[in-house]
Image (tube, coloured by chain):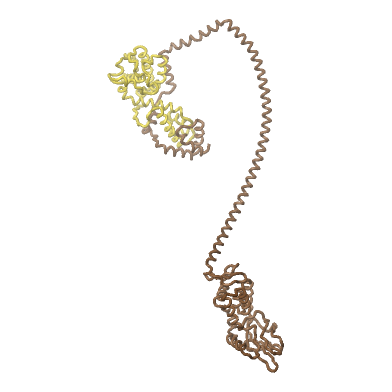
Chain colours: A yellow, B brown
Amino acid sequence: MQKSNRKKPAFGLCGGITLGELRDERKFDDFVRQSYERLLGFAYQLLGNWDDAEDVVQTVFMELWELVTKRLKEPNANAIAVTYQLVKRRTSDLRIKQPSSFNPEWLEEPFSEEAFGDGLSWEEEMKDVEGIVIAIEKRRAICECGNQFQGRAREVFSLFLQGVPNAEIAKNLGISAARVSQLMKIVFIQLKQKLQEMGYDCNETVNVPLKF
Amino acid sequence: MRCEDVHKRVLDYVMGKLTEAEVTAMDKHLDRCEDCTKVVDSYLNELGLFNLEPEKNELFRLMRIPMPSQERVKAGIEAVLQAIHGPKAIAEHEVAPTVKEQKSKTASWAEQFGALVGQFATYWVYGLATVAVAGLIIFAWNEHAQRKAFEHQIASLQMQVNLLRRQNEAVKRENETLQRKLEQALLERQRTQRVFEERQKQLEKRLAQQVFVLVRDRAGAVTINADGTVRLEGRQILPLPFAQQVKELITTGAVKPSKPALLAMATLNSGLMLNTLRSAKVETSQKPIPISPVLTAVRSVCPKLQWKPVEGAKGYKVMIVDKNDKLLWQTKVEAETKVIVPSGVLRRGQVYFWQVEAFLNEQSNLSPVVGFWVLSEEELKEVTKAERKFQGSALVLASLYAHHGLYEEALAQIERLSEMNPTSPFVQGILNNLKRQLGRE
C-alpha cells in the first residue's frame, strides 16, 4: 500500500481536499455543498431509489463529520475518495439488508483503519464503480456547461436534459425539427470543446455501467 | 440581420464564440431562413459526423444519467448541515439582535445631541430640496420649450432634405435616361461603323480582285475584274447585258448587233454596199458620195441626209426607195448638200435605200446606193432608257448604240473616248472598226 496513491487528486473540484482539512467547519460545509449532488447521483446509481440514496448520503456525511472530529487517524487521506467509499459500503450494506427495511444500525459500525481496505489502495477498491464516479463527474460538468450556452441552444439543451424528445422540443419552441437537430449538433460540438477545456477526455468511448 | 452577415459568422456561431446579442440575432434569422440553416448544416458536416444515437454517443449517454433535482439537493444539504451544527447557528442568530437593542437603549447624550443637530439639518435639507425642485421644474420647462423649437427646426430641415432628395432623385433619373440614350446612340454608331467597315472590306476585296484599268471614261476609270464583271468608277458593278456588251466591244472591237439590226444589215447587203462605196471613193469620176446615214440605224423618222459635194455641180436630187425598189420620195434639184426627210415618208422598223444624183453642165452622175434603217419603237424605248441610266459613261453608251445599230452615234462616243485615251489601243481598235463599218476610212 502506497500513500501517494491515496493522495492523488482524482475528481472534480474537491479532489484535493484531505480529511485533516475538514476539521475546519467552514471547509466541511463547502465540502458538503460541493460533493452532495455527486454522491447522491452515485448512490442513486447503486440503489435505484432517490429516497434511499438521500438517506445513505446524509448518514454518510454524519458519519464523516463524526470521523473527522472525533476519531481521525489518517488526516492525509483523500476526503472525497473516502466519502465515495463510505457511500459504496453503505449502499452494499443496504442492499444486503434488503432495501425495504432500512436499518440505521450500521451507523454504529466502527470506522477504523481497516475501513480503507484490506491492504488495497482506495483506487483498487473503487475499481468496479470507477466508471460510475467518472460518469457522474462528467455529468455535473455537462450541467455546468449547459448554463454557458446562449440563445436557442440553451433552450434546446435544457429541454433535452429534461428528457423531452426532439419533435416536442421543435413544437414547443416553434421551430423545425431539422433546426433542433442542428442546434443539438452545435450543442455537442461546444460541449465537447468545453469539457476538453475543463480537462475531461471525451473521445474515449467509456462503457459506463449505468443501471438507471 | 442579412444572410451575408450570417454566412460570415457561421463558424463563430457553431463554436460558441459570439456574444449573447449576436447569438440571439443569428437564432432569429436561422429560425426563419432555410437557406442559412442549410449553410450551417454544411459547416457542421464539414466539422465531423455526429452520432445522435444514445448507444453510440458518450455525451448523449452521460446526459441521460438521472441527477437529483436542485430542490432535493438544497434540502439535503441543509438537512445535513443542520444535523451537524444546526442548533449553534440558530443560537447565534438569536443573540445578535438583543445586543443591538441594548446598545440603542443606552445611547449617550452626545448621540442625542447629534440627533437634534440632524433634525435642524433636515429643515435646511427641505428648503434646499424645494429650491432644487423649483429650479429643476424651470429648467425642465425651458428645456421643453427649447426642445419644441428645436423639433420644429428639425422638421423644417427634414422637409428641405426631403425636397432636395426628391430633386436629387429626379436629376438622377434624368441622368440615367440620358445615359441610356447616349449608350443607345453609341451602340447605333458602332453598328453603323461596323457595317461601314464591312463594306470597306468588301470594297477592298474587290479592289484586290480587279485586274487592270481599261479606259478612262468621263465618269472615271472603267475596270474589269477577275470574275469578268465590269465596273464603272463611282458606280457599282454593271448589270450583266451591258457588262457583256462592253466586254465584247473592248475585246473584239465590235458588239454583236441586235436581231432587228442583223436583219436590217442582211437586207441592206452591207458587204456589197461597202465595196461599191469604196470603189466610188477611189474613182476619180465626179460622183457624189453619201456620208450619212450609211449602213446605220436612225432614230427619227425625219433623218438628215448628207453627202459629199461634187465639183462644178449645179444641183443635187435625192431619192429614197424602200426595200422593194419602190420610189417613196424625191427632191427637186437644189444646190445644198444636205436635206431633211419630211415626216410621213419613213416608217419605223423599216429599211430604206437612198441615192443622190448630181447635175453637172451636161451630164448627171449617180452616187452609189446606200441604205439605212429606222429604229423600231421598242428599240428606241430601250435605248432611251439605257441612255438615261448610263449618261456618264461614253463606253457604255457606245456599246449600247453599237448593239442597236446606231453606229454613227457610237462613233461619236468613241471619238470622245479616244480624245480622253489617246494612247489606248482598245479605243483605237474600236474606232477603226466602227469607221470601217460606216465606210469612212
Q: Is residue B378 visible?
A: no
Tell whether B248 sits left or right of A9: right
Q: Is residue A131 above or below residue A65?
A: below
Q: Position of residue A39 (x, y in %)?
A: 38, 21
Determine the image quadrant of residue A89. Answer: top left
Of the pair B209 and B182, the residue shown nearer to us: B209
Determine the image quadrant of residue B343. Answer: bottom right
Q: Position of residue B198 (x, y in %)?
A: 55, 60
Tell whether B337 sits left or right of B111: right
- The residue at the far bottom in this view is B362
Of the pair B149 and B299, the residue shown nearer to us: B299
Q: Is residue A83 above or below residue B305?
A: above
Q: Is residue B192 above or below residue B44?
A: below
Q: Is residue B208 visible?
A: yes
Number of marks present in the image shown: 0
Determine the image quadrant of residue B367. Answer: bottom right
* Residue located 46% across and 11% down the image: B90
Please identify the quadrant where the C terminus of chain B is shown: bottom right
- The residue at the far left in this view is A119
Of the pair B22 and A166, the residue shown nearer to us: B22
Q: Position of residue A57 (x, y in %)?
A: 37, 19
Q: Position of residue A30 (x, y in %)?
A: 42, 18
